[in-house]
Amino acid sequence: WQFLIPYLHQHGHQKYMLIVHDMVMNLKGGVSDRIKQQIIWSRTVNSSGGIGKNIPTDLMCEFLNRMFKG
């Protein structure tokens, strides 16, 4: 995430740069250990079980939307 900040700044994505910067600063010491773990581990979902079968949370939402629409 830290390496994205200069890229986002260079390409004019100020809003995303600020979001990424805020997240990095929180993980570096701005929040408690419990919140750090929540930030790190709440980005993926493992609905099928097993090691290495995590998918991003937003992709899981897309799968659920497709399932409920069908």
Image (cartoon, grey):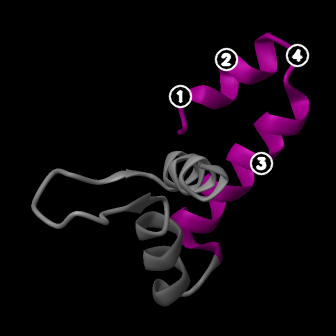
Name the secondary structure under disc 4. Answer: loop
For the point 51% across and 49% down, the residue is 63
**Residue 33: horizontal and vertical position, in percent?**
46, 85
The residue carrying pointer 2 sits among few (fewer than 14), some (14 to 19) or many (20 or more) residues within 10 Å by Cα, namely: few
Name the secondary structure under disc 3. Answer: helix
Which of the two discs, 3 and 2, labels the residue nearer the N terminus? Answer: 2
Any mark on residue 3, and which? 1
For the point 55% across and 87% down, the residue is 32
Q: What residue type is labelled 2?
A: Tyr
Region of the chain picked out in magenta, as a range: 1-30
Q: Is residue 59 left or right of residue 31?
A: left
Q: Mark 2 points at which residue?
A: 7
Which of the two discs, 3 and 4, labels the residue nearer the N terminus? Answer: 4
- Report if the CB atoms under discs 3 and 1 are less than 8 Å apart: no
Q: Which amino acid does label 3 sit on?
A: Ile
Which of the two discs, 4 and 2, labels the residue nearer the N terminus? Answer: 2
Q: Mark 4 points at which residue?
A: 12
- Report if the CB atoms under discs 3 and 2 are less than 8 Å apart: no
Q: Give the Cα distance between marks 1 and 2.
A: 7 Å
**Residue 20: horizontal and vertical position, in percent?**
69, 45
Q: Which amino acid does label 4 sit on?
A: Gly
Which of the two discs, 3 and 1, labels the residue nearer the N terminus? Answer: 1
Out of 21 and 49, give the one closest to the viewer.
49
